[in-house]
Image (cartoon, rainbow, N blue to C red):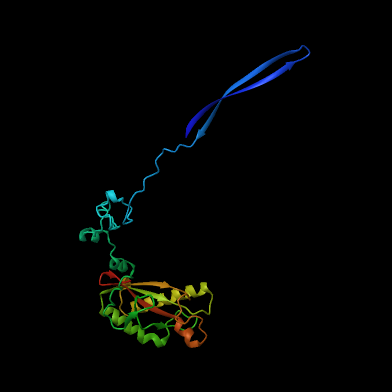
C-alpha cells in the first residue's frame, strides 16, 4: 500500500450573544488514504514436470520422477537400492515366521510304552487304576506296576519321573486333592518296593482337575478318571518338556 495525503479547510461563521460579535473560524486538517499497490510482482510459478517435488531447475531428470527409496533421493532421477543396502534394510519374513512358530518338541525317549500326553509330555501309556475313594492300587493294576518298575530299572537314563495322582469328580475338591496325592504316594512306594530308586521319583496330586472324561456319568468313565500316570521329567541329563 502507498499513502496519499490531502488538505481540507472548513470555514464556519458564528455570532455571539448577548453582545453581538461575529467572526469566521477556519478548520484545517490532513487526510491520509491508503490504496493498494500495483507494482508488486506476482509469485513465480515453479516448474516440476515429473511431479516428484524437485523443481526442474534442480532436477537432473526433469521428465522422470525420483524413486522414493531413501537412496540418492535428491537428484530427481529414478534409481534402485544397491544389493548390500537392500539386504540390510529388508525384513527377513522367513526369520520372522520362525520366531512366531512354536519350538519343536524334543524327541520321545526310546522307551517302550511311552507316548505324548495332551500337554506334549512323554508319558507311560499304562495308567494304574484305583477303586472309588481308595488310595490303594486296584489289584487289576498289579501286573502293570510290575512292568513299569521293570522298564524304569532297565533304563537308568530315565533320571526322574513324576508320579501324578488323579481323582474322579464324586467328592469335594479338597477331598479329591488329598486323595490324588495319597494315590501318587501309594504308587511311589509300590515302585520302590519293586526295586526303583526313590531319588528318581517325585509325586504330585491334581485332584479332579484333569479328568480323561470331563462331566463323566458312567462307572467306566469315573474309573478311568481316578488313576495315576507316570511322566518322564529328566532323561539322559536333559529336562523333557
* Residue situated furthest right in the rendering: 18
Horizontal side of 233 relative to 221 (left or right) equals left
Q: Is residue 10 above or below residue 121?
A: above
Horizontal side of 149 relative to 213 (left or right) equals left
Q: Is residue 79 above or below residue 230?
A: above
Horizontal side of 122 relative to 139 (left or right) equals left
Indicate the quadrant where residue 190 lies.
bottom left
Q: Nearest the camera: 62 or 40?
A: 40
Q: Position of residue 4 (x, y in %)?
A: 50, 29
- Name which residue lies at 21% across and 59% down: 82
Horizontal side of 154 relative to 204 (left or right) equals left
- Name which residue lies at 35% across and 87% down: 143
- Name which residue lies at 54% across and 27% down: 6
Q: Position of residue 231 (x, y in %)?
A: 35, 76
Q: How many labels does the image show?
A: 0
Quarter of the figure that contains the C terminus: bottom left
Q: Where is residue 197 in the image (x, y as percent from the top left)?
A: 30, 74
* Residue situated furthest top in the rendering: 19
Indicate the quadrant where residue 28 lies.
top right
Q: Where is residue 126 in the image (x, y as percent from the top left)?
A: 36, 83
Amino acid at each position: 500500500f502507498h499513502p496519499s495525503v490531502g488538505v481540507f479547510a472548513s470555514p464556519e461563521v458564528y455570532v455571539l450573544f448577548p453582545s453581538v460579535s461575529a467572526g469566521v473560524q477556519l478548520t484545517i486538517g490532513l487526510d491520509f488514504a491508503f490504496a493498494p499497490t500495483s507494482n508488486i510482482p506476482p509469485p513465480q510459478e515453479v516448474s516440476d514436470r515429473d511431479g516428484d517435488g524437485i523443481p526442474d531447475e534442480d532436477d537432473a531428470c526433469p521428465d522422470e520422477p525420483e524413486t522414493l527409496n531413501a537412496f540418492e533421493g535428491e537428484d530427481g532421477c529414478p534409481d534402485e537400492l544397491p544389493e548390500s543396502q537392500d539386504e540390510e534394510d529388508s525384513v527377513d519374513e522367513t526369520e520372522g515366521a520362525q520366531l512366531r512358530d512354536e519350538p519343536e518338541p524334543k524327541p520321545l525317549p526310546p522307551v517302550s510304552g511311552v507316548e505324548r500326553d495332551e500337554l506334549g509330555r512323554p508319558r507311560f501309556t499304562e495308567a494304574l487304576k484305583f477303586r472309588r475313594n481308595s488310595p490303594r492300587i486296584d489289584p487289576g493294576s498289579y501286573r502293570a506296576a510290575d512292568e513299569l518298575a521293570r522298564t524304569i530299572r532297565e533304563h537308568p537314563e530315565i533320571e526322574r519321573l513324576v508320579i501324578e495322582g488323579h481323582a474322579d469328580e464324586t467328592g469335594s475338591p479338597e477331598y479329591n486333592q488329598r486323595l490324588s496325592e495319597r494315590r501318587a504316594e501309594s504308587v511311589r512306594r509300590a515302585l520302590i518296593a519293586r526295586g526303583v530308586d526313590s531319588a528318581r521319583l517325585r509325586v504330585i496330586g491334581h485332584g479332579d482337575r484333569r479328568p480323561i472324561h470331563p462331566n463323566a456319568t458312567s462307572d467306566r468313565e469315573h474309573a478311568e478318571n481316578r488313576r495315576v500316570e507316570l511322566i518322564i521329567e529328566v532323561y539322559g541329563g536333559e529336562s523333557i518338556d
